[in-house]
Amino acid sequence: MDPLIDTHIHLDAPELAGNGFSLVPPAVAHGIGAFVVPGVRVSGWQPLLQQIERQPHVYAAPGLHPVYTEQWSPEAEQQLIALSRQPRVVAIGEIGLDGVHGPPLEQQEQVLRAQLQIALGARLPVLLHARKATGRLLEILRELDVGHKVGGAWHGFSGSLQVAQELVRLGFKIGVGPILLRPSARKLPAAVTALPLSALLLETDLPDMAERPETLIAVAEKIAALRGCEVAQVAAATAESASRLFRLKD
């Protein structure tokens, strides 16, 4: 079976007390072949890149999470532009809009647009975060044609089939994670079943949504069960999509 690829895992999260990267070797032994780690704070970008230099299976996606919008500055912008040129940086993320936490959405949008321009300039895909702001984020993505120009993944998707289909039309992949394993999940299973398998990516969003990277295996198994196919098919299709999107290579 093809190795699985976790397209959104916070191995550098403060909650892991510096031990996140120790989870990589056992996960690799269980069949997870690559990990994309989003950056969320300016102060975390350089340490993340330094960690990844010692991790052959791990890639970085530095960006400023919308709840930390106030950390943006001309210096942060120049730093992100420089990081976008690093060989193990495969995306800009986790960026987007959050209508629940963080500064006013108008301020978030300014910083989002600046980061989208960096992604477009570097020809890098984006990892998108949206909470209570789906409609506005979709408008911005349409306006800039981000999906067709560089692509990206809508992280932690839990919405309707209609929204998922619109994202796919706009050139994005759908990040499917442990939300799918919840008994209360209703919309997501319908989307996972109806979308082309090539539109899906796997993620754990550890530590927020999972305690171990191996939860990714359960997500793949659930997708296979919903679609009535073999786990190997899910692994092959999602790994190919992730490898193409992020141009992964070791």
Image (tube, rainbow, N blue to C red):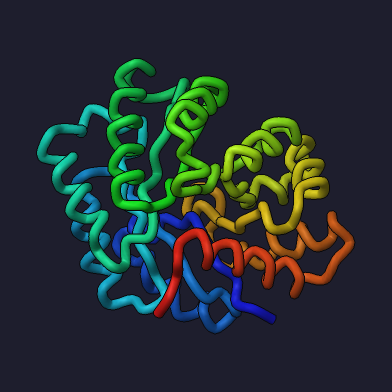
> Which quadrant: the N terminus?
bottom right
Q: Nearer the viewer, residue 110 or 220?
A: 110
Could you tell me residue 20's position as x and y percent? 38, 65
Could you tell me residue 205's position as x and y percent? 51, 52
- Seen as rendered, the residue at the extreme right is 228
Residue in view at x 53 percent, y 47 percent: 153
Is 159 drawn above or below residue 28 in the view shown? Answer: above
- Give the left or right position of residue 158, taking residue 41 as reference: right
Q: Nearer the viewer, residue 217 or 168?
A: 168
Is 85 drawn above or below residue 1 in the view shown? Answer: above
Q: Is residue 15 visible?
A: no
Could you tell me residue 191's position as x and y percent? 76, 42
Residue 168 quadrant: top right
Could you tell me residue 44's position as x and y percent? 24, 51
Residue in view at x 48 percent, y 55 percent: 8
Residue 106 quadrant: top left
Residue in view at x 14 percent, y 44 percent: 78
Residue in view at x 29 percent, y 46 percent: 121
Is 134 drawn above or below residue 152 in the view shown? Answer: above
> Which quadrant: the C terminus?
bottom left
Residue 248 quadrant: bottom left
